[in-house]
Structures are given as C-alpha cells and as structure tokens.
Image (tube, helix red, strand yellow):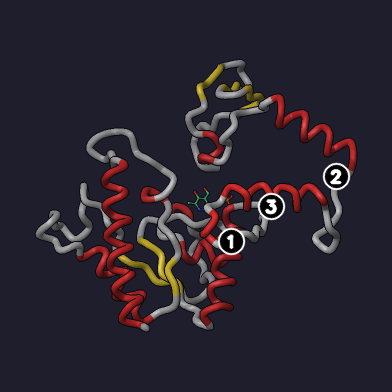
Amino acid sequence: MYYDQPVMIVEGKMQYVWDDTGKRYLDAFAGIASISVGHCHPHVVAAVQDQAGRIQHTSVICLHPTIARFAEKLAGRFPDDSGLQVSYFTNSGSESNDLAVMRCRLYTGRFDMIALRNGYHGGSQATMALTAQSTWKFPVPHSFGAHFAIPGYCYRCPLGLGYPSCGVKCARDVAERARDRGLLLGTAGIFGNTIRLTPPMCITRSDADFIVDCLDDVLAEVELKLR
Ligand SMILES: Cc1ncc(COP(=O)(O)O)c(C=O)c1O
C-alpha cells in the first residue's frame, strides 16, 4: 500500500472520479497520465461493450483484426519520414520498457543500460533494476547491467553547479557512461511524466527542453566519435 490513507476510487466520469464515500475529485492524475480521454468516455465504453460481446480473449498466437487496424491508424499518424510503421502492443509501461531493453540488447549485442538517477521505470526485474528511487525498489538483486548517470536538474543541481559556468557536466556524465556501454534508456520519474507544481521545485517546459537539447548535443557528439 502506497499511502497511510489511500483513496478508494469507485467511479469515474470524464474528468471526475468519486471515492467510496461519494466525494468527488477533479482527476488531475489521469492514471499517471495514461487516461488521456477521461474516465468512461461514452465512445470508449461503447467500444469496450461491443468487443466484450464479440470475443474477449484469444492469444498472441492468433491474429486479431482490431489490433491490426489500430496499428495501421497509429502508423498513419507518425511523420512520413519517421520510418515508424511497426507497433508492438504491451499491457503496461514495465512490459514495454522490458521489451525496449531486450530489443536494444538484441540489436546492439551489448547488455549494459544507463538510466538517470531518481528515475522510475517500472516494477519488473529489469525495470526495477533501472529504477533509482529506493521507495520503488525491493532490496534484492535485480536484473544485470544497470548503471546510473547524474540527472540534469538546474534548480537543484546534484553537482552544486550553476548554468552556464557548469559546462553541462550532468549531460557529459551521461555521455561518458554511454561511451563505454551499450544504450541509453529515456528519462523518467521527476524528469519524465511527473511535473512538480510547487515552487521552488517547479521545472518549466523550457528547462526540460534545455536539458533534452544538452543531452541530444552531447550524445550526438559521442555517436560521431564512436563511428
Ligand atoms: C515513467 C514510468 N515508466 C514506467 C512505468 C511503469 O508502468 P506500469 O505501472 O504500467 O508497469 C511508470 C508507471 O508509473 C512510469 O511512470
């Protein structure tokens, strides 16, 4: 249980949810940003009801037309020159990160992974290994090859430095680790889908863009050197 007094949510409608005492909440949490169309949107409810009345489960060894149609629609929304035409659907964030790790390992033939400190990547063996928040890890050995780099965070610089005199040492730390190892898994946790709204911890869009730009530049440099 994550909280001393967890909220029991029993109903949802669009942007609102209700707890078991009938109290209504405006849901700014949105299933950790995964409920993008609100709760129980009538179109979603109708589609779920329709599917439940046809067939509820097959298996990955069979084809299903809805999955193919969805993949086609998704591919139609990616930029033409992105080369992103293939989708693989998973049941959870942990599962998709696991899959990403496996694909990168297969493709590169390298096994190490670099994640940023303070990040959260999931609750499976591999993603818990990459997670760097003690509250979300069990004290047991996890999967192998997880390494952590310093996260860029200009408001509370982990190195006690200030921009621009810092020379973006945080980005260089990631790059240096990437030089010797296999691949980089994206940011998460306070640098990913959680935005803290209370000053002085707030991080603005332009700060986030700045950090991403720094990482992009430095990693591009490293990539050139590796060629
Ligand atoms: C950034 C991030 N990665 C991965 C996950 C894991 O997703 P799931 O709980 O669906 O396995 C989460 C879940 O909160 C997340 O916030």
* Contact (Cβ within 8 Å) of mark 1 with mark 2: no
Q: CA distance from mark 3 to mark 2?
A: 19 Å
Residue 5 point in image, percent of width and height: 51, 31
Residue 195 is tagged as none
Q: Earlier in the sequence, mark 1 or mark 3?
A: 3
The residue beneath circle 1 is: 124
Front-lying residue, 124 or 74: 74
Q: Quadrant of the C terminus?
A: bottom left
Question: Which mark is in front, 1 or 3?
Answer: 3
* Disc 1 element: loop
N-terminal of the pair, mark 3 or mark 2, is: 2
Mark 1 or 2, closer to the camera? 2
Furthest-right residue in this view: 54
Dot 3 lies on which element? helix
Residue 77 location in percent, x, y?
Answer: 58, 47
For disc 3, the marked residue is 71
* Disc 1 residue: CB within 8 Å of ligand 1: yes
For label 1, the crowd category at 10 Å Cα-Cα, with few meaning under 14, some 14 to 19 and many 20 or more, is some
Tell me the CA gap for discs 1 and 2. 26 Å
